[in-house]
Amino acid sequence: MGLSPQELLNLIVTAAEEKKGFDIVILQVGHLTTVCDYFVILSGRSTVQVKAIAEHIQDKLMERGVPVLRREGFREGFWVLLDYGDIVVHLFREEEREFYGLERLWRDAPIIKPAVSSLT
């Protein structure tokens, strides 16, 4: 049996927090795009941390039988995208997150509070 979107979101948030990912926001974008249903947007303080968070998310989901479908930007570590089909993770270094402003671009999307987040 596959994991529900909420279970996947919880796993992603938990894994990100375990590696000190911060400012985690989940946007429900399914009614605005056909690309996916949710964006998980979060930050890391350095390229090394961004890569560590991305690898940890991938490892934790793979342990539950959920492979990443596509990964972009890992080599540079400024903006890493992890595609899980219905959920796309956007993991930024702080400066790039501010510059690209995905939350501004997708401001019509409802914000979903991470259910397991200790940061909220």
Image (cartoon, grey):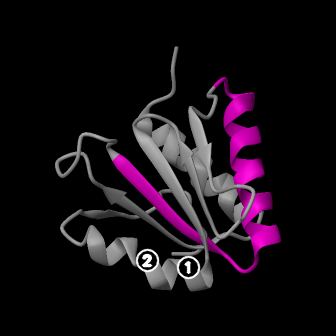
31, 8: nearer the viewer:
31
Is residue 11 rendered to the left or right of residue 98?
right
Name the residue located 52 percent from the left edge and 53 percent from the top edge.
89
Is residue 35 rendered to the left or right of residue 33?
right
Against 53, residue 9 (above or below) is above
* Image-quadrant location for residue 60: top right
Which three-letter amino acid code belongs to the residue tagged 1? Glu
Mark 1 burial class by Cα count in 10 Å: few <14, some 14-19, many 20+: few
Which three-letter amino acid code belongs to the residue tagged 2? Tyr
Against 113, residue 14 (above or below) is above
Residue 54: give x, y in percent of width and height. 70, 54
Name the residue located 62 percent from the left edge and 28 percent from the top edge.
66
Numbered tag placed on residue 107 in the rendering? none
Disc 2 designates what residue?
A: 100
Which region shows up in magenta?
38-65
Disc 1 designates what residue?
A: 96
